[in-house]
């Protein structure tokens, strides 16, 4: 291990690896630290939606990821009443075990040094130029010096606290998933399925077909996890009540335990930057409310932080922090609409109408597609006029 780097990145998930690849490609010396030994399996639904495709294109990795993923024809939304619609969007499913290993390889191939088994425990600011970052490793404390720090430790609240970025510890969102192999259904299901279902009260369920006939099936709760003390029981209700889940489990083989993890969504609860320390990915809440998708935005914020350092490092910490904070704030209005739109989970009538109308008319389908593809303003979900147009379009 070297002891001095231009940039230290803590956390080698999609956010950390995207930043590491970008900065190392630009000639910065990068130390990429993670407490885990890789490959490590991050609990996730494994779906790549359009923003992930965009970020992977920018990183020059889309072909490599396509080669290991199961492409989907789009996303099927199923309402509480069983009505459904297929919407077009670049989408795919790839197990995080494989995706994260690929992203890490790509960061190292660009020149980043990877240091697994290093748990971040604290930072001291030596002077205006340098930080000393402390890690716990195999029973000892070690440290390294750097000009810039990117915190990419995901939903882990303790790390955000150690870094001095935490404003509010609350994390209301929680999701669980399981892997099930089913050769028969793998021949028939070629889309990511999102279902609004009463067993996942305050959230939704999903069934995503991945490579090797392995499905990722799970449920997520948004803005209300504290009211759901037993996600396991809700998951069991989900797989015994939803017809598609029943079908999957009937002759499917369960190949993993049910695992759960919290999600930090909504770009809230943290500062985005503090001096030469920038937070990226889920640690700053860069996972979308409403959908819980965060892989794409983790990579996007990692790239934005890398670009802020590359473009402004000669102007110092304040300029970099301001540039980065501005770019994250530009994303906030969209996150806010998604957060408000979580009311749909608790309004089955409106959710069913949205799905039914999207299935019947092009206008509504385009609006919904625009939400997932980030080509349209999702604000139509929050206004009376938006709903009037949905309910009365093409009638
Ligand atoms: C059940 C579930 C399903 C989901 N489904 C989807 C989905 O289908 N699609 C999607 O886009 N998003 C999904 N998400 C969200 C997605 O998993 C996250 O948005 C994404 O992983 C965030 O990436 P990241 O790089 O910010 O953090 P992570 O991927 O969490 O990576 C953080 C890294 O930091 C390391 N770390 C943590 N603390 C320390 C420390 N103290 N010292 C050193 N290293 C540390 C960890 O070991 C880890 O490797 C889901 C989340 C859950 C819980």
Image: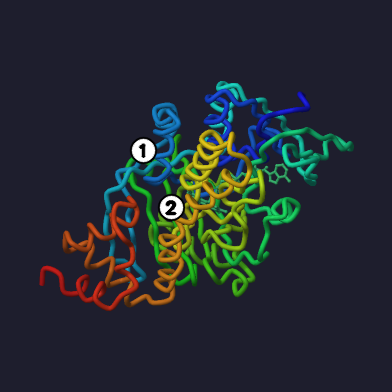
Which residue does the numbered mark 1 point to in the structure image? 71
Which residue does the numbered mark 2 point to in the structure image? 207
Mark 1 or 2, which is nearer the eye? 1
The CB of the residue at mark 1 lies under 8 Å from ligand 1: no
- For residue 6, above or below residue 283: above
The CB of the residue at mark 2 lies under 8 Å from ligand 1: no
Mark 1 and mark 2: Cα distance apart in space:
14 Å
| Mark 1 nearby-residue class (10 Å; few <14, some 14–19, many ≥20) | many
Q: Quadrant of residue 19?
A: top right
Q: Residue at x 10, y 72 (%)?
A: 395
| Nearer to the camera, 67 or 313 | 313
Q: Is residue 58 left or right of residue 278?
A: left
Residue 317 in picture, x, y percent from top left: 63, 43
Q: Secondary structure at mark 2?
A: strand
Q: Is residue 309 left or right of residue 29?
A: left
Given the current orientation, which residue lies at the most extreme left position?
A: 395
Residue 148 in picture, x, y percent from top left: 66, 38
Q: Residue at x 79, y 46 (%)?
A: 122
Given the current orientation, which residue lies at the most extreme front position?
A: 315
| Mark 2 nearby-residue class (10 Å; few <14, some 14–19, many ≥20) | many
């Amino acid at each position: 291990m070297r002891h001095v780097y231009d940039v230290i990145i803590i956390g080698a998930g999609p956010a950390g690896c995207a930043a590491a690849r970008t900065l190392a490609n630009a000639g910065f010396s990068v130390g990429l630290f993670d407490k885990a030994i890789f490959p490590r399996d991050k609990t996730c639904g494994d779906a790549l939606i359009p923003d992930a495709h965009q970020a992977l294109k920018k990183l020059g990795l889309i072909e490599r990821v396509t080669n290991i993923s199961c492409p989907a024809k789009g996303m099927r939304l199923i309402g509480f009443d069983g009505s459904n619609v297929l919407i077009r969007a670049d989408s795919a499913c790839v197990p995080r075990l494989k995706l994260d290993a690929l992203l890490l390889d790509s960061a190292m191939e660009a020149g980043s040094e990877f240091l697994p088994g290093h748990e971040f425990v604290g930072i001291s600011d030596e002077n205006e130029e340098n930080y000393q970052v402390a890690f716990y490793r195999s029973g000892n404390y070690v440290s390294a010096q750097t000009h810039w720090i990117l915190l990419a430790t995901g939903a882990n609240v303790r790390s955000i606290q150690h870094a001095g970025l935490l404003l509010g510890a609350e994390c209301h969102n929680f999701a669980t998933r399981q892997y099930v192999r089913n050769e028969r259904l793998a021949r028939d299901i070629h889309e990511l399925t999102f279902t609004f279902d009463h067993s996942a009260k305050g959230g939704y369920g999903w069934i995503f077909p991945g490579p090797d006939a392995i499905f990722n099936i799970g449920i997520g709760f948004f803005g209300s996890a504290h009211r759901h003390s037993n996600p396991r029981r809700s998951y069991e209700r989900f797989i015994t009540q939803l017809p598609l889940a029943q079908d999957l489990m009937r002759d499917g083989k369960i190949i993993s335990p049910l695992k759960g993890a919290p999600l930090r969504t909504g770009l809230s609860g943290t500062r985005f930057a503090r001096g030469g320390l920038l937070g990226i990915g889920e640690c700053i809440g860069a996972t979308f409310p409403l959908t819980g998708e965060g892989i794409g935005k983790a990579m996007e914020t990692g790239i934005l932080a890398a670009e802020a350092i590359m473009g402004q490092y000669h102007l110092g910490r304040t300029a970099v922090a301001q540039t980065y904070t501005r770019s994250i704030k530009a994303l906030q209005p969209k996150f806010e609409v998604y957060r408000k739109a979580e009311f749909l989970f608790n309004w089955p009538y409106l959710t069913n109408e949205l799905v039914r109308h999207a299935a019947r008319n092009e206008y509504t389908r385009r609006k919904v597609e625009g939400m997932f593809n980030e080509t349209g303003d999702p604000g139509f979900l929050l206004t009376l006029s938006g709903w009037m147009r949905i309910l009365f379009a093409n009638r």
